[in-house]
Image (cartoon, grey):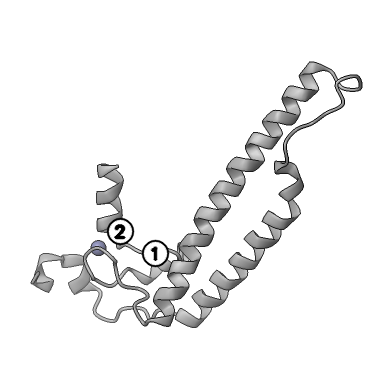
């Protein structure tokens, strides 16, 4: 068990800000809607590039393939974010939201305000960043 004194920052912060879970949940749900809508709107962009060779030159074919590859990459990031949102919503439902998955300490509410899908406190997050 780590004593509070080992973290002078936490000692100074005796009235800690209240975490607005309902507000964050609403943001997560809205963001999820947005991502799903974007994914649906751009689905056509990710279809295999089959262009009329007679009509378009090699360069525009390459452009089209690059645009497709970019759309696939954006979709991959959307799906990653959707998984992060789903797991945050799950933690909210289970009453575990706001706690670091690694050390179990409370995540700074300011951090969650900025990134509501955060599942680690800043200390553990930068630790796993280094280990990557
Ligand atoms: Zn942690």
Element carrying mark 1: helix
- What label does residue 122 carry, if any? 2
Cβ–Cβ under 8 Å for marks 2 and 1: yes
Tell me if mark 1 has few (under 14), some (14-19) or many (20+) residues whose alpha carbon lies within 10 angstroms of its own. some
Q: Which residue is drawn at 49% across and 68% down?
A: 86
The Cα atoms of the two marked residues, 2 and 1, are separated by: 8 Å
Q: Residue at x 56, y 47 (%)?
A: 76
Given residues 102 and 44, the one toward you in this image is 44
- What label does residue 111 carry, if any? 1
Given residues 92 and 49, the one toward you in this image is 49
**Quadrant containing the N terminus in the rendered view:** bottom left
Residue 9 screen position, x and y as percent = 21, 66
Query: Which residue extends farthest top?
Result: 58
Left or right: residue 75 compared with residue 128: right
Left or right: residue 130 compared with residue 20: left
Residue 116 screen position, x and y as percent = 46, 67
Beta carbon of the mark 2 residue lies under 8 A of ligand 1? yes
Left or right: residue 124 compared with residue 93: left
Q: Residue at x 29, y 67 (%)?
A: 100
């Amino acid at each position: 068990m780590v004593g509070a004194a080992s973290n002078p920052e936490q000692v100074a912060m005796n009235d800690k800000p209240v975490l607005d879970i309902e507000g964050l949940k609403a943001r997560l749900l809205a963001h999820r809607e947005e991502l799903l809508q974007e994914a649906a709107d751009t689905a056509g962009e990710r279809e295999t590039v089959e262009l009329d060779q007679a009509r378009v030159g090699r360069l525009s074919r390459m452009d089209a393939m690059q645009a497709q590859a970019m759309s696939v990459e954006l979709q991959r990031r959307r799906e990653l974010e959707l998984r992060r949102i789903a797991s945050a919503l799950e933690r909210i439902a289970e009453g575990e939201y706001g706690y670091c998955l690694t050390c179990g300490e409370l995540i700074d509410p300011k951090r969650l305000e900025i990134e509501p899908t955060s599942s680690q406190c800043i200390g553990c997050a930068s630790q796993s960043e280094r280990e990557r």
